[in-house]
Amino acid sequence: MKKVNPIVKDDQFIDSFLRPSGFKDYIGQEKIKKGLEIILKAAKKRNESIDHLLFYGQPGLGKTTLATLVAKETGANLKIISAPSLSRAGDLAAILTNLEDRDILFIDEAHRLNPAIEEIFYSAMDSGKISVIVGKGPSGRIISLDLPPFTLIAATTRVNLISSPLRSRFGAIFRLDYYAHDDIKMIIKRSAEILKVKINPEAILTIAKASRFTPRLANRLLKRSRDIAEVNDLEIIKKETVLEVFDMFGIDEMGLELHDRKMLEIMIDKFRNRPVGINALAAALGEDKDTIEEMYEPYLLKIGFIQRTPMGRVVADDAKKWLNY
């Protein structure tokens, strides 16, 4: 098997090399790309910084990638920070006052912003100013600082947890949906070319089907398939190679993981496939209900393996057939 390009030999850096270098290389999310194209062209024509943007959707769908591409298209500096790391108002004030003209500040996991921190963004986004307190006690005073024109891009998996005042300040809100099956196949093929590995169509199809319509997972399965191929001195990744990866990580050909199958089996066996509420299901699984709603349910709903009814969740017939019930 061909050796991996030395530029991308370190596994922890491979994902950044697999990301598209421009919107022309970004596969999928066509409506979002068209919307961003209009926003970027209009801002360039007016010679202004672009409006504040909010991206939301399941993990691994490309929110950070889109922010990176927006920065590249506008020639702006991109500064990335995770919301939980902003624990003090002074931290955010320091970041904002050190921004340069038309910089882009990307906040990941925006739903985890501290409310006190969030409020600082209000005036920063509305008027390009922030107020800071200098001194303590009776001698303390509030001063207003002007900020250079900048763009805030926020990303979240839980848009419902972002407060209405903050959400309303974004000029555009984009929802990233799961990718089409054909788009995932194109992404796998492109990534294989970048990694300089050979993979046959059947292996691409197998990875795509188990990727949960998510580019990050598709690339992860491709990288682990590459590992097995290299260890075994295989010239090409075949379906059998991919199936070894599935077996290693407890994944089946539909992309179901151990926790997915456990949840479905409990719903069928313990609850006799009667409608079950989220609290009862969380108790039976020993999981937090947010984990079920954020991690387990979206994909199972997408492929039609569970259904939500007014009475609760039920397992669909297709899931029973897949699990041999």
Image (cartoon, rainbow, N blue to C red):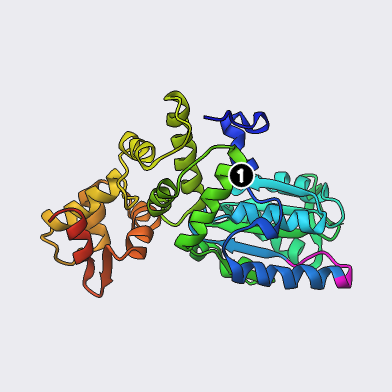
- Which residue reaches farthest bottom? 310
From where the camera sits, is residue 169 visible? no
Vertical side of 77 occupied by 273: above or below: below
Pinpoint residue 207: horizontal percent, then vertical percent: 41, 48
From the viewer's side, name the closer residue of 64 and 2.
2
Q: Main secondary structure of the magenta part?
A: loop
Q: Is residue 311 left or right of residue 230?
A: left
In magenta, the rendered stretch is 45-51
Q: Is residue 57 left or right of residue 293?
A: right
Pinpoint residue 172: horizontal percent, then vertical percent: 66, 71
Per the image, the residue denoted by label 1 is: 18
Q: Residue at x 73, y 53 (%)?
A: 105
From the viewer's side, name the closer residue of 104 and 181.
181
Q: Residue at x 88, y 72 (%)?
A: 46
Vertical side of 302 occupied by 206: above or below: above
How many C-alpha atoms fall within 10 Å of the one at disc 1: few (<14), some, or many (≥20)? some
Magenta stretch contains residue 101: no
Label 1 element class: helix
Q: Residue at x 47, y 36 (%)?
A: 236
Q: Is residue 189 left or right of residue 32?
A: left
From where the camera sits, is residue 262 visible? yes
Pinpoint residue 74: horizontal percent, then vertical percent: 80, 59
Three-letter residue code for mark 1: Leu
Q: Residue at x 65, y 41 (%)?
A: 17
Pinpoint residue 43: horizontal percent, then vertical percent: 82, 70
Vertical side of 134 occupied by 229: above or below: above
Number of marks present in the image shown: 1
